[in-house]
Image (cartoon, helix red, strand yellow):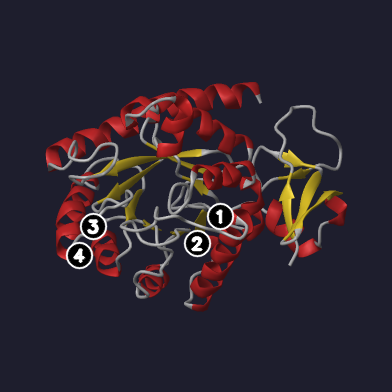
Amino acid sequence: MVYYRPIVMTDPCRPAGAHTVAGGGCWFTHAERMERGGSSGLVTASDIPADVLTRLTEPRALVSGVSMDSPRIMGILNVTPDSFSDGGLFREPDAALAQARQMMADGADILDIGGESTRPGAATVDVNDEIARTAPVIKALLTQDCAPISIDTRKAGVARAALDAGATILNDVAAMTYDADMAQVAARANVPICLMHAQGDPETMQDAPHYDNVTLDVYDFLAARIATAEAAGISRSNIIVDPGIGFGKTQAHNLTLLKNISIFHGLGCPILLGASRKRFIGAIGNAPHARDRMPGSVAVGLHGARQGVQILRVHDIAETRQAMSLHLAVN
């Protein structure tokens, strides 16, 4: 199989004939041609097969009413006792609601609410406990003028309860491999679902992860999960993909995926990048504590935006919004 990674540009001096990346503000004239045997160098956009070029360039559908024509910010709200960065801070409903309001004031386009930590080594949470943590917060938020709400869960039962409470996006870190019923939940509700790559489950995923070619292995996994979703009745226009930075990956794997992230535009879906405060940022940026990784997280987010990524899932919303505003102003 041959893969094409667009060489994404943001320069305002755009040449005639350049192709727009996924209907957004980035463009490309060339792509890297990649195979399992290695890269075979640059090709012009005219050398890319028509069906691949269409997927690289066609505008993405709205995600719960949010346009994907420029980078959007998904704010992380963990109502858990043990998430790696903010576990326990927003476990109580009043604290969660206050944080959600602050996130929207800071510029979050989407709120992603999770009731089960997926940090390395985390244990599985009972479905009823996860529902008890998340559904009341979602229901309370819907009494206000609220951004679209995503439920971060692997479990169909939690997803159903969240949708009943008012969530309109599903974010499944297991890409429907943990609970096969998730596909039917998404199909019947006709809502967007984010399919993320992870090698192993949270308890074991960092135990010596290995890939033959991390970029192409992740690409093929996501392509297969998209096919499964479509077979279950989920439209590709309702699918978001996430390469799963930090989920069963070494630092080298994470960096390789970030360098090659534009290849995932070839799947024809919005790309979500969730690298906020991850361990590799602390390792490279000399920040052992997650709370001190904001600058590195913003840097990675801006890299994603320059590669045409549509959704940045972050903890530090105000800082990311400010950086993104400046990025868009000068590009």
Sequence-wise, which precedes: disc 2 or disc 4? 4
Residue 310 visible in rendering? no
Task: Read off the residue under disc 3.
Answer: 123
Which corner quadrant of the image does residue 52 belong to? bottom right
Q: In this view, does 260 lie to the left or right of 142?
A: right
Type of residue at label 1?
Answer: Ala
Q: In this view, does 282 lie to the left or right of 264?
A: left
Sequence-wise, which precedes: disc 4 or disc 1? 1
Residue 243 x %, y %? 52, 53
Residue 157 visible in rendering? yes
Residue 317 x %, y %? 38, 31
> Label 3 vs label 4: CA separation?
13 Å
Residue at 29 percent of width and 61 percent of height: 163
Sequence-wise, which precedes: disc 3 or disc 1? 1
Circles 1 and 2: CB atoms closer than 8 Å: yes
> Label 1 vs label 2: CA separation?
8 Å
Sequence-wise, which precedes: disc 1 or disc 2? 1
Looking at the image, which is closer to me, 282 or 322? Answer: 282
Task: Read off the residue under disc 4.
Answer: 127
Find numbered disc 1 in the image and state the secondary structure of the residue it sits on.
loop
Type of residue at label 2?
Answer: Asn
Indicate which disc residue 61 carries: 1
Looking at the image, which is closer to me, 144 or 8? Answer: 8
